[in-house]
Amino acid sequence: MTAHYHVLGAKQFNRPELEELFESAIRMENREIWSTDPRYSGKVMTTLFFESSTRTRLSFESAMCRLGGKVIGTENAAQFSSTIKGETLEDTIRIVSGYSDVIVLRHTDIGAAERAAKVADVPIINAGDGAGEHPTQALLDLYSIRKECGRIDGLTIAMIGDLTYGRTVHSLSYMLTNYENIKILFVSPENVRIPTYVRHYLEEKGVSYAETDRFEDALTSADVLYQTRIQKERFPSIEEYRKAEGRYIINAEILERMRKDAIILHPLPRAGEIAPEVDDDPRAAYFRQARNGLYIRMALVEKCLQYEG
Ligand code: NCD
């Protein structure tokens, strides 16, 4: 088996590699015509999604189409694949490897992408592994921060909401360790705090962070408010979920108290934690952020395929 450029977790990226991807994403964004590239015309991407998705799956598929490649896949792999007959993830990946040049995998289990990469004969891109990681979301989050704020170094980023089950905050925290003088403020209800292993990684890398359950602290200090959904489907019981829901809602009143030069990001989908009245405020950057996913994924898929030669 040959070596492939897998994208499994946020820790694998260093700063020069991130910068290279961002530059490549800018080139994708500035393309006037999305012409098909002959290098990719015969290439096939498989999107294998065991959990639901709108943005991640469709932006990967659109990215591949815009690069000139083709896409096959299943958006409900848990039901519409041989998994229902008891096939292991490893076997599914072995089979799908034979049909594809790159596999984008979203799975319910932490570590699924690593397991897939061990048996795959093509690059695996982790599009979310349960409550684990979501590295390509972190890439587009950083790309968005860089575009909106003009820099990443020196910023204070408040991550708000479900920090236990929200995989995007785990990946974003890891990736931020590549930058200088970052401050992270984790704002969450007591029962969904940022996992210890994420805090340890930040400590190891010398990134300064603080934890609080007070929304107010974020409003006055943060350059970026990274709002997240309470991941209802991942809670052990509805009672636990109830303890966490509805605590931090960005609405018109919060906008008034927020810094005038701060931005609001959200990986989306939102489930009530940002009121629709916020959408027209120039600081609401989450729809622009979702669009950036397309460019960053084009850059990433190009890199995976180039590596294959
Ligand atoms: C996130 C995810 O799936 O982890 N969404 C996304 O990829 N854009 C966040 C979420 O589901 O709440």
Image (spheres, helix red, strand yellow):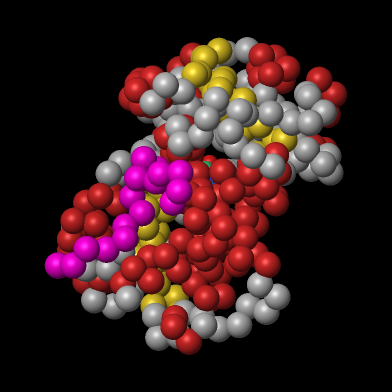
* Label tally: 0
For the question of whether residue 292 can be seen, the reply is yes
Work out whether residue 272 or residue 48 is closer to the camera in this orientation and state it.
Answer: 48
Image coordinates of residue 152 in percent, x first then y, are 60, 37
Image coordinates of residue 256 in percent, x first then y, are 85, 24
Work out whether residue 45 or residue 40 is closer to the camera in this orientation and state it.
Answer: 40
- Does residue 12 sit above or below 32 in this rendering? above
Image coordinates of residue 29 in percent, x first then y, are 65, 64
For image coordinates 55% across by 83% down, the residue present is 36
Residue at far left of view: 1
**Is-magenta flag for residue 3?**
yes
Which quadrant holds residue 284? top right
For image coordinates 83% across by 39% down, the residue present is 281
**Is-magenta flag for residue 147?**
no
For image coordinates 82% across by 28% down, the residue present is 260
For the question of whether residue 286 can be seen, the reply is no
Looking at the rendered image, the quarter that the C terminus falls into is bottom left
- Does residue 37 sit above or below 48 in this rendering? below
Prevailing SS of the magenta stretch: loop
Image coordinates of residue 99 in percent, x first then y, are 29, 78
Q: Answer with left or right where residue 76 lies relative to residue 55.
A: left
For image coordinates 52% across by 76% down, the residue present is 67
Residue segment shown in magenta: 1-17
Work out whether residue 154 or residue 299 is closer to the camera in this orientation and state it.
Answer: 154
